[in-house]
């Protein structure tokens, strides 16, 4: 219980926001209601602060038809992001330091099947018309075809509270993760402001 309280404090302190969030897993049985509320508020604040420096483009919900192990679910998500990145930025996008950035919450449905909620940014407003479509519907269909579940992708609107919506899954025993390049994107934005 003490370690969880320490993690909450780490997440709350501004300089440790990004490092304090990655990999924290909270079980429903380890937190009482007040601690869950504190944790949800801390994560919601973290995501809201992150939203000041980043421009998210999409809010996505990605599901699986059947039960999958969390590692399998993560690999499916990463394959989907990889396909998106290759489509937008080309084959060697990582060598050029390009790629979309994202924050993702994992939650288990009542039937114990994982689904993700994600904020995704770095989607260009214009793209090469000779490439496949970059419409949200295309990427919903791509998830269904390759990863075997339903997807909904909406334009991100910060006024609708998606940051706190993602944060609430921590209090429900979920996980929050973010892309490896997000720290660099935040630092770049901080330097520009």
Image: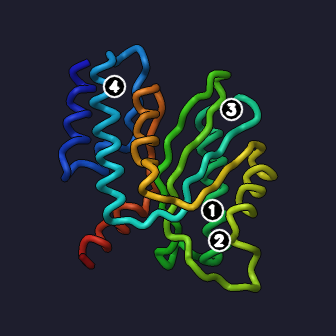
Question: Callout 4: helix, strand or loop?
Answer: helix
Q: Quadrant of the C terminus?
A: bottom left
Residue 36 occupies which quadrant of the picture? top left
Q: Is residue 76 above or below residue 181?
A: above
User: Which of the marked residues, 2 or 3, is nearer the chain's N terminus?
Assistant: 3
For the residues labelled 2 and 3, the Cα–Cα distance comes to 25 Å
Question: Callout 1: helix, strand or loop?
Answer: helix
For the residues labelled 1 and 4, the Cα–Cα distance comes to 33 Å
Q: Quadrant of the N terminus?
A: top left
The residue wearing badge 1 is 82
For the residues labelled 4 and 2, the Cα–Cα distance comes to 38 Å
The residue wearing badge 2 is 86
Q: Is residue 80 above or below residue 134?
A: above
Could you say which is closer to the camera, residue 99 or residue 150? 150
User: Which of the marked residues, 1 or 4, is nearer the chain's N terminus?
Assistant: 4
State the image coordinates of residue 103 (x, y, percent, origin top left): 46, 52
Q: Is residue 73 above or below residue 66?
A: below
User: Quick check: marks 1 and 2 in contact, CB under 8 Å?
Assistant: yes
Residue 68: numbered disc: 3
The residue wearing badge 4 is 36
Residue at image point 19% right, 53% down: 15
Could you say which is closer to the camera, residue 30 or residue 118? 118
User: Which of the marked residues, 4 or 3, is nearer the chain's N terminus?
Assistant: 4
The local crowd at label 1, few if under 14, some if 14 to 19, many if 20 or more residues have their Cα within 10 Å, is some
State the image coordinates of residue 150 (x, y, percent, origin top left): 74, 44
Residue at image point 43% right, 19% down: 28
Q: Is residue 24 above or below residue 118?
A: above
State the image coordinates of residue 95 (x, y, percent, origin top left): 51, 76
For the residues labelled 1 and 3, the Cα–Cα distance comes to 20 Å
Side of 125 relative to 159 (left or right)? right
Residue at image point 68% right, 40% down: 63
């Amino acid at each position: 219980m003490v370690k969880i309280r320490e993690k909450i404090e780490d997440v709350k302190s501004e300089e440790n926001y990004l490092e304090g969030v990655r990999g924290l897993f909270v079980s429903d049985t380890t937190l009482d209601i007040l601690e869950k509320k504190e944790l949800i508020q801390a994560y919601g604040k973290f995501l809201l602060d992150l939203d000041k420096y980043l421009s998210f483009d999409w809010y996505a919900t990605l599901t699986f038809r059947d039960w999958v192990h969390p590692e399998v679910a993560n690999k499916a998500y990463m394959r989907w992001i990889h396909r998106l990145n290759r489509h937008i930025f080309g084959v060697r996008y990582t060598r050029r330091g390009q790629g979309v950035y994202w924050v993702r919450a994992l939650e288990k449905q009542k039937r114990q099947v994982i689904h993700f909620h994600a904020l995704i940014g770095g989607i260009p407003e214009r793209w090469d018309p000779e490439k496949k479509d970059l419409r949200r519907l295309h990427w919903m269909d791509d998830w269904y075809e390759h990863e075997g579940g339903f997807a909904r992708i909406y334009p991100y609107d910060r006024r609708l509270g998606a940051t706190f919506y993602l944060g609430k899954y921590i209090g429900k025993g979920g996980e929050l993760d973010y892309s490896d390049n997000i720290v660099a994107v935040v630092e770049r934005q901080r330097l520009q402001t």
